[in-house]
């Protein structure tokens, strides 16, 4: 009988022999009072639940706790289940992406036990099973993505993994609360190739920006030359302003050119 049918039919008959053993256990407890009371009273903490088995069957009512509960000696046993959120690291997984690039990816998963009865009755070790399932899910999800998608869409990948894990562990009473991708490690050769590509792209952008600057400067010089051509005295004023700027600096040697018109008079003499 599965855990689902046991929960749906909590009054399942344990048989005449079973009831006889239960009666003997109760009688033994009454005979050995008050010593036996310390063996029958159990306590579970606020974050724990107890699953009680009577002659191998889950007792009606499902999980017990928190607080006090009673068990019968010899016929009852119980298992404590921690209901707190548990986190674990997904070991680095070597994944071949959709565009045939090998990357190493690791992550972290946060989950908690939502149904203690299912976590005990439906699976041997819910924690180990969730860890193994997280590793295979990580490889399966990343195998459908390109390298660019893995590097840029981490949140979408984590959400897809969380949904897949939550659906797969629902029958185990597990609730996957959060999945995060921690690190994506690329091969060294691929890192160098990507760095060279990024450097080439930066150099190309720098050359484009420099060319645009030269073009804008040439346009400004053209406009300035048109303004100066309209007034010859403007060129002399600009020349004097340039000399003033140079003279403001210390240890400057200024070569002052003379117009050829001034030399014509000396040549004639």
Image (tube, helix red, strand yellow):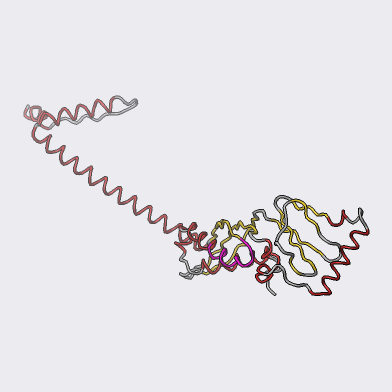
Location of residue 117 by image quarter: bottom right
> Residue drawn 65% across and 61% down?
115
**How many marks on residues?**
0
Image location (x, y in percent) of residue 240:
19, 27
232 sits to left or right of 112: left
Residue depicted at 70% across the width and 75% down the height: 1
Examine the structure image and report whether residue 172 is included in the region drawn in magenta: yes
Which residue is most to the left? 268
In the rendering, at what x and y percent does residue 175 appear? 60, 60
207 or 61: which is nearer to us?
61
- Residue 221's image quarter? top left
What kind of secondary structure does the magenta stretch mostly adopt?
Answer: helix
Kindly indicate the quadrant of the structure image that contains residue 136: bottom right
Q: Quadrant of the C terminus?
A: top left
Q: Which of 20 and 117 is in front in this view?
A: 20
Residue 73 appears left or right of 156? right
Q: Report x, y in % for residue 238.
A: 18, 30
Front in this rendered view, residue 257 or 209: 209
188 to the left or right of 119: left
Q: Position of residue 99 (x, y in %)?
A: 46, 69
Query: Which residue is situated farthest in the right direction here?
Result: 31
Depth check: give the residue in front, 152 or 30. 30
Residue found 23% across the figure and 47% down from its top: 215
> Image check: 87 left or right of 235?
right
Q: In this view, does 259 lie above or below 176?
A: above
Numbered range of the magenta stretch: 163-174
Q: In this view, does 12 lie above or below 27?
A: below
> Is residue 91 found inside the magenta-colored segment of the image?
no
């Amino acid at each position: 009988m599965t855990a689902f049918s046991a929960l749906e039919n909590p009054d399942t008959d344990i048989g005449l022999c079973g009831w006889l053993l239960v009666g003997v256990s109760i009688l033994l407890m009454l005979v050995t009072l008050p010593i036996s009371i310390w063996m029958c009273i159990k306590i579970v903490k606020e974050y724990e639940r107890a699953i009680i088995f009577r002659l191998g069957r889950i007792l009606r009512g499902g999980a017990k706790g928190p607080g006090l509960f009673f068990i019968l000696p010899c016929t009852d046993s119980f298992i404590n289940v921690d209901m707190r959120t548990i986190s674990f690291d997904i070991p680095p997984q070597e994944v071949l992406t959709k565009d045939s690039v090998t990357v190493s990816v690791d992550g972290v998963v946060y989950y908690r036990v939502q149904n203690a009865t299912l976590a005990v009755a439906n699976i041997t070790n819910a924690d180990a099973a969730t860890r193994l399932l997280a590793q295979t899910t990580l490889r399966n999800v990343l195998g459908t993505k390109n390298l660019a998608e893995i590097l840029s869409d981490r949140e979408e990948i984590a959400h897809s993994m969380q949904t897949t894990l939550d659906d797969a562990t629902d029958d185990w009473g597990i609730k996957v609360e959060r999945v995060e991708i921690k690190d994506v490690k690329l091969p060294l050769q691929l890192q160098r190739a990507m760095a060279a590509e990024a450097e080439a792209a930066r150099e190309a952008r720098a050359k484009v920006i420099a060319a645009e600057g030269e073009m804008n400067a040439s346009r400004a010089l053209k406009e300035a030359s048109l303004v100066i051509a309209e007034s010859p005295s403007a060129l002399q004023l600009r020349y004097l302003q340039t000399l003033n700027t140079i003279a403001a600096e210390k240890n400057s040697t200024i070569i002052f050119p003379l117009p050829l018109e001034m030399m014509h008079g000396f040549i004639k003499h």
